[in-house]
Image (cartoon, rainbow, N blue to C red):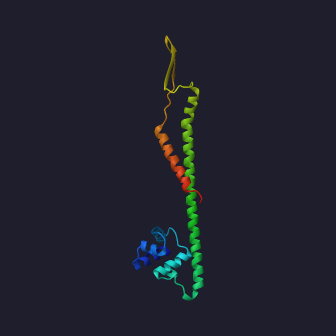
Amino acid sequence: MLSENLKQIRKAKELSQEELASRLHVVRQTVSKWEKGLSVPDSEMLIRISDQLETPVSVLLGETLDVSQDADMIQAISEKLSRINEELAKNAEKKRKRFRAVSITGLTAVLIYMAVQFIPLLRLRALLPSGVNAAISLTGGAAGPEVVLVSAVRVNEIGIFLALAVLAASVAGMYQTRKR
């Protein structure tokens, strides 16, 4: 396979990934991805790689073809690379959609949680007379308190913190998985 052959030939020529990347005018991570099989070079880059490694493209691809079949070889190589690129694109799109679905689910869960936490609090605020912000309020006359109004609302601080963290992660995930 291309990834294994590329790595073996590069090492046989005593080149580091950095040196090969420099000669090809790409970053080292690109060469690493090729060698790990995470991506494949396009046909033009494959020709440049074969020139730099002084190795026929057919050897890089693990095939042995006749020299007289140059046109057929180029066609076969480009078809093979097209299929590989299409497969990689499909896999990347599946991962993007899956991650986006998880992000949307997380965002929805956070919004529901926040609504459950804050709607009762807002409703209680609307019932209180204006200006009453204390947790305990006493009203009354000279004989002592006539009405005791207790308005203590317990808010789950840890839950809210975790919800905000999930919200931030969901928004970041949706941003990262947008179509460009």
User: Is residue 166 visible to us here?
Assistant: yes
In the image, farthest residue toward the top: 143
| Residue at 52% from the left image edge and 77% from the top image edge | 46
Left/right placement of residue 50 relative to residue 72 reads left
Left/right placement of residue 20 relative to residue 81 reads left
| Residue at 60% from the left image edge and 83% from the top image edge | 72
Q: Is 153 drawn above or below residue 74 in the view shown?
A: above
| Residue at 57% from the left image edge and 82% from the top image edge | 73
Residue 180 percent coordinates (x, y): 59, 60
User: Is residue 146 visible to us here?
Assistant: no
127, 61: nearer the viewer = 127
Q: Quadrant of residue 177?
A: bottom right
Residue 132 percent coordinates (x, y): 53, 25
Q: Quadrant of residue 81?
A: bottom right
Residue 58 percent coordinates (x, y): 52, 81
Q: Is 92 drawn above or below residue 6 in the view shown?
A: above
38, 15: nearer the viewer = 15
Q: Is 60 drawn above or below residue 139 in the view shown?
A: below
In the image, farthest residue toward the bottom: 68
Q: Is 124 drawn above or below residue 106 in the view shown?
A: above
Residue 39 percent coordinates (x, y): 52, 69
| Residue at 58% from the left image edge and 26% from the top image edge | 127
Could you tell me how many numbered marks the image carries? 0
